Image (cartoon, rainbow, N blue to C red):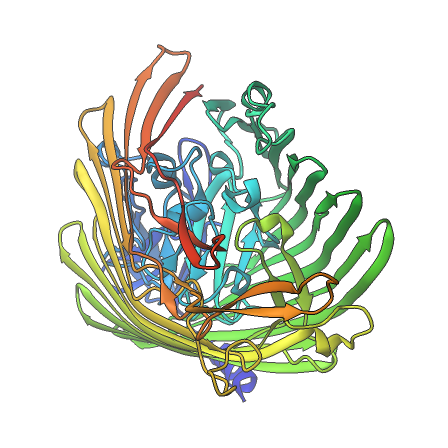
Amino acid sequence: MLLVGLCSVIHSTQGQELAALDGFVTDSANGETLIAANVFVEGTLRGATTNLSGYYAVSGIEPGTYTVRFSYIGFDTIRREITFAPGESVRLDIELTTSEELLEAIEISADRITEEEVRSIGVSQITVATIQQLPQVFEPDVFRSLQLLPGVAQSSDYSSGLYIRGGDPGQTLILLDRTKIYNPSHVFGFFSSFNTDAIKDVRLYKGGFPATYGGVIGSVLDVQNKDGNRRETDGKLSVGLLASRAFAEGPYSRGSWMAALRRSTLEPLLIAFEDIDAVPRAFYFYDFNGKINIDVSRDDKLSFSFYAGSDYLRSTFTEGVEIKLLYGNRTVTGSWVHLWSNQFFTNATITSTWYESTPSATFSGTNFKQVNRVVETSVRADFEYYAGSKHDIVGGLWAGIFDAPLTNFFDDREVFHTRNRVEHASLYLQDTYRPTTNWSFTAGLRATYYGYGHYFTLAPRFSMERQLGPDVRMQASAGRYYQFLTLISNEVFSGFDFWLTSGDGVKPAYGDQYILGLKTNLFEGITLDTEVYYRTMRQLFVLDPFSTGLAGLEYAELFAFGKGAAGGLEIQLSRQSGRVNGFIAYTLANTNRYFPRLNQDTFGMPRSYSPRNDRLHDLNVVGQWRISRRWELGAVFTYATGQAYTRPEATYTVYSPRIVNGLDQTDLLVSPGLNQARLPAYHRLDIGVTWSGSLGRFADYELQMQVINTYARENAWFIFNEFEDDGSLSRSTIPQIPIPLPNLSFTLDF
């Protein structure tokens, strides 16, 4: 019925004598396309925002002469007077110039707000400039910056994992140039593998994402790489305590190119402390981003992008105990954008992603090794049809082959092996209908076939928006979401993570999401965003920790099955202009899980529990003060409810008469429930100072000095329990970053 209705809309819009306007919006300085730039036809209330390719289309314009306004945060607004004849289609490509006035402040926002912008519910956006200026541990990091937004929680100072609206990192789809990335982290989860020098846009769908995306029940992170400077060749060099970066971009006859390299620089420090057992004997990481763009014609654009990243660790903890870990990602993407008309836009993409982790350990001569691979090749074709003034229709296909072998070895002997090779395909269709200037409705449907288990799912999505006034928008959404993969993760080191799929006897997880939001412009440059959400998680499957062994089990016997729910309130107050700007983000939330196998009361009855990432309160205060053109001060304060953990409340002793002279004694811990206790509240203050200047016409430079955990708060990471000689139980706190941690970096931009 939805397809028939949309086809009738397309037919009814043909033949109307209305005019249309379309084109690309780019940065005049480098030719980069601008995502989510605003286009507004004054006097008509007709407008649009550019898509991920920088393309816009405005249809349904009555014949006549109008002023068209083009705007983008941080750029000067441009107005063009255009006369439209009946049925005329006007192609207008626009270049916007960076605003000198707005350069006086670094923009920090979770969702740009302008009077004509139409914004989706649940979407957050953070600029690359913000990411690079915030005080952070060692490196500017995408994930750690996103953790400051409402609804996004961190697990520890040592993890950049995204826990979004009660979900775990495995419930977030991560895309780089439309390609899936598995475990995009360095230093075992310490920070993400996205090099900020290479990134153009970061967009997070915390929930309620449209039918365009699928495969997860939680959220979507969509990252776009830069295309490369189309005006001139330039570059950047940066040296830090943990890593150094190099970036270059430039034009060529029919397009542009971009390359970025980052590598760790810890080897000299490791050599200096090589006599200490806990210091790794070898460690490095690197990542490389590359992209080439080809302008085949005015209506055809090709792009090819490549990513590679890897981590390696070799460490000897005590005599006879050695651990090695190698893991990394590779992606290749080819994309073709074609404009069939001013109303019909397509983007076809072929992607291949590869992930491998090979942790191994030697204990007193016994060797263990795990080989975990994920290889996925897919094709994706999307279209956008601007069907008159009231309908925008999008649709597409996403199909591929997922292959994930997992093998365990003991002393070079295979003891466990499973391989999931799955063909999958998805079709989606979505229509945004605007009956009046104050109302919009979006309805979509995503159909998915998953070969392993022969599962077929239908996921409806719906959202609406009501303009309550010139500065107030009310939004709501509801949708069904499915997920076929589960992430088996390690809370300490992400390099041990691996993925298992739904299959025979293991149904895909699914969930429903409901969101209500209010977005308000309070004053000039000051905005208030509020969202309330509730989500369910059904048919969750995790590796059963009580399995007696993996060998010989049926696939479904590997898992424990359960469900969960999460709800919360998110508030963000932002100031986006002036020398002093920033935001305050507050989250009031609760999440729970119910796995009968994992948590039971003293009578053996199943009961729900709080996952480790459950936090009732989460507050982040972010500020930037541009003191002068050369000096800038930044600060980040974080407060959060302590994480849930399992605390033993009693002990008992088991005696086994296997020793000739006496008994074999084992002391065991007794806990009343899983994660029934809380760590102390978490809070931390980070500050940073940036000094920038120029080396004449040759280059600009920037020196960043930061202090993490300024007042030396010893936030708890774990509680360690051990038995004393007298049999009593003692507890000690393992802290996170326990001292003020300085960081220094120098960047040369030429």
Camera-side residue of 367 and 569: 367
Q: Quadrant of residue 685?
A: top left
In the visual, does 473 lie left or right of 183? left
Q: Name the outermost residue toward the left.
A: 523
- Can the viewer see residue 451? no
Camera-side residue of 745 and 721: 721
Indicate the quadrant containing the N terminus: top left, top right, bottom left or bottom right.
bottom right
Identified at 78% across, 56% down, the residue is: 408
Indicate the quadrant containing the C terminus: top left, top right, bottom left or bottom right.
top left
> Does residue 129 sit above or below 267 in this rendering?
below
- Can the viewer see residue 136? yes
Q: Where does residue 200 sit, x and y in percent of width and height? A: 46, 42
Q: Where does residue 185 sit, x and y in percent of width and height? A: 55, 45
Identified at 70% across, 39% down, the residue is: 322
Q: Where does residue 387 sit, x and y in percent of width and height? A: 46, 71
Identified at 51% across, 80% down, the residue is: 563
Camera-side residue of 498 and 365: 365
